[in-house]
Amino acid sequence: MIPELGHYALVLALFVALVQSVPPLVGAATRNGAWMNVAVPAAIAQMLLVLLSYAALTWAHVVSDFSVLNVVQNSHSAKPMLYKVSGVWGNHEGSMMLWIVMLTIFGAAVALFGRNLPPTLKARVLAVQGLIGVGFLLFILITSNPFIRVIPAPIDGNDLNPLLQDPGLAFHPPFLYAGYVGFSMAFSFAVAALIEGRVDPAWARWVRPWTLAAWSTLTMGIAMGSWWAYYELGWGGWWYWDPVENASFMPWLAGTALLHSAIVVEKRDALKSWTILLAIVTFSLSLMGTFLVRSGILTSVHAFAVDPKRGIFILVLLAIATGGSLLLYSLRAPTLKAGGLFAPISREGALVLNNLLLSTATATVFIGTLYPLFLDILKLGKVSVGAPFFNATFVPVAIPMVIAMVVGPYLSWKRADLGAALTRLWVAGVAVVAAVAVTAYVKAGSGPLLALVGIGLAAWAFVGSLVEFADRIALFRTSFKNSWNRAVHLPRSAWGMTIAHASIGLSILGMTGTSAWQTESITAMRPGDRASVAGYEFQFDGVGLVDGPNFKAERGTFTVTKDGQRIATLEPERRSYSTTRMTTTESAIHTTVFSDLYVALGDPTQNGTAWIVRIYHHPLVPWIWIGGVGMMLGGLVSLTDRRFRIGAPERRRAAGKTGGKSAPLPAE
Amino acid sequence: MRRLLYLLPFLLFIGVGIAFYLGFERDPRDIPSALIDKPAPTFDLPAIPGQMVQGQPAASGLSSAKLAGDVTLVNVFASWCIPCKAEHPVITRLSREQGVTVYGINYKDKPEDALTWLSRNGNPYAAIGADQDGRVSIDWGVYGVPESYLIDRKGRIRFKHVGPLTPQVVEEQILPMVKHLRQG
């Protein structure tokens, strides 16, 4: 009964979504207030219905209702509760449900908090959101219905892919999807603005918080995915340039560009049509990510759910959403009024450079990911593009990007003095030289030359961003109390930028460290054997058998010591899942913030008395993800900036001091 | 002229959209091979340097002489190839439970990486040849890794699969073919 309720709620949500889109569009065109206002209750009702439907599906998974096909295919009565809940979105149908849940939450948020939006813009934004909802609800109901029953019901289910039964991956999709879907807000605002024919700083001030929120969650989602790959999939690799990874990385790159170009629209009323285009492209890349993952058009290790029929449907959706909006763009964008002028060397100029480099990076990843497909269609042969291509093309674009990232915030709007900016960066320059010199001395030439470039770049990004912040609060140039006061009163967006930019430095540090200086030992070890890696002693104490809820495992025990001091006990496992007949390796990791000790248990040797044991020392690797979390925090701090808070401009006006229009708060 | 510039994103998208559509009609795994029903190329590959077999350094790698006799599967793999990791359980089951002898060609790999990979994931191969410069793989017509070739008792290539083997391919194509070839 409960799955039927969920199914019914989903069908109802489809019709509510139609009500959310058609009347408001007509109303906005004919200036009919009542028709426009329909969008608000409709958006809220759609969210409630979709949530109800999602709750029904979750219920079926939690109580292991094996009369529902989706539960049979992806669950098992012995599966731990965490994975029963996360298993709801661990499969195709459920993940699409999660997608639409996120979409309607964002839509309802605009309906509830968008009180001071111009009424026609609000109606059109909600209508476009409604249309996206219509597309995806149709997709779920027609090709991917999660509520289909099986009769007779089997006794137990097939279980979820064991690789996905992992806490890191359990929460990876919700973050990723919140990011993907969050960009739909920027898209809806862009399309609404094109229909309106007007883009102004107020519009940008509305788009930026949504983009920031989406970007922050996407950053987190990608970081979690990479962390999972690090400890579950590989042997310390943290990024594989796999098509599905690229599919999430492209919207991130384009979204980063959007984030920055929206600043120019907001502060200087320039780059308008470019920003609109970026908003469309970013969401289209998110849709394409969904398409690439679901269609099986590219081969990938992530091909957990592949079905060409669904791919065709998503392709049609993509054609309508992207094709339609780009056509609208080509008709309306030329009529947008151009805004403020600026010299090439200026804050705007720096942000344009950032946008050019980020777009190039996006295009690089795009071409690398789709090149095999294009060649195949043109009958020029089959190829696979791997990490060497991306490393050779992406890194040269990323290096100037990071260098410019630090200089940009020193430049003033309209026209700036590059020489003066660089002089103020002398501290960062000294830091780079020191970091490279120390590294070269300590490592005495081990590791590639590129590693020194990486260390220098990390120091530049980290120190340069902090120096800029110190400069703003006049640290050491005035009393400490005075600086403190300045810091407290700096806009949160300035704080956010410093945190995010400095965090990029931390991530680069981690990437460089582990790529250049990891050490490893692979040996057959008998209980009692010792191995020594990077100054740590590993004693192998033996292997025991462990019963898990839906697997059996061999668990090895290792005691790690350094200079006679006990550091940690590591217990790597080899698990065999009986239902899916798959084996997974659960590596054991001890982290000291500055490095990871990583132990994995391999096959027993022929006579069964020894095991192949792999021990790794990954220097600096945790900083990749610390940096990722830092970037997300930067985004969230920036999101709390006063000017984004609802009604903040209104209150200022009510106070009567500033008078006139709701002027943006000065950032400096 | 300026209007055309604004139309450019739309036109680019049309191109990409058409490519996606045509992509459906092509299976990325469906690659013609000129070598079907031809004898497998003659080759003699050394073992992966450092590889141990039952506590001894592996004496020989893989050569065409080993292929004749029984129906065998030759699988081209590399430690740097992620789909290879995905197909590994399938290969393992094929060799350990479904009774098909599987030989490996280790394609353009560093020996230490390949050995790490095998120790981590298990070694289902009856013998492995290390093709470090990829010359032999060119003779086989290898487009990319992973690829698998089914060889009949007379040493002829009878079937080729590009991309990771899935349980479905094994059940529907490889096992019936093996059965047929063993009878024939």
Image (tube, rainbow, N blue to C red):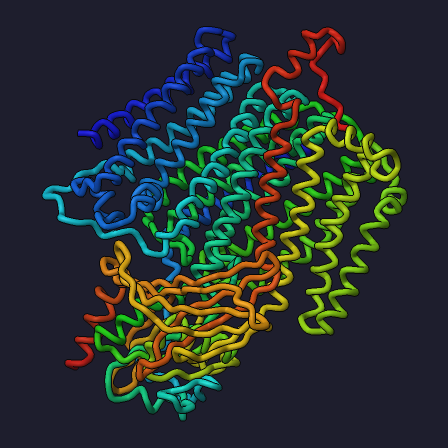
- Residue B105 makes an appearance in the image: no
* Picture residue at 72% right of the left edge, 64% below the top: A452
Q: Nearer the viewer, residue A200 or A402?
A: A402
Q: Which corner quadrant holds the N terminus of chain A?
A: top left
Q: Quadrant of residue B117?
A: bottom left
* Picture residue at 54% right of the left edge, 48% below the top: A249
Q: Which corner quadrant holds the C terminus of chain A?
A: top right
Relative height, residue A590 to residue A423 (above, below): below
Relative height, residue B14 to residue B65 (above, below): above
Q: Quadrant of residue A399?
A: bottom right
Q: What is the x, y in percent for residue A54?
A: 32, 32
Left or right: where A606 falls relative to A124: left
- Residue A59 makes an appearance in the image: yes
Relative height, residue A602 to residue A117 (above, below): below
* Picture residue at 70% right of the left edge, 8% below the top: A655
Q: Nearer the viewer, residue B159 or A180?
A: A180
* Picture residue at 53% right of the left edge, 74% below the top: A537
Q: What is the x, y in percent for residue A404?
A: 75, 47
Q: Nearer the viewer, residue A354 or B161?
A: A354
Q: What is the x, y in percent for residue A131?
A: 42, 26
Left or right: where A641 falls relative to A55: right
Left or right: where A296 falls relative to A272: left
Q: Nearer the viewer, residue A657 or A122?
A: A657
Total marks drawn?
Answer: 0
Relative height, residue A654 to residue A88 (above, below): above
Q: What is the x, y in percent for residue B7?
A: 59, 35
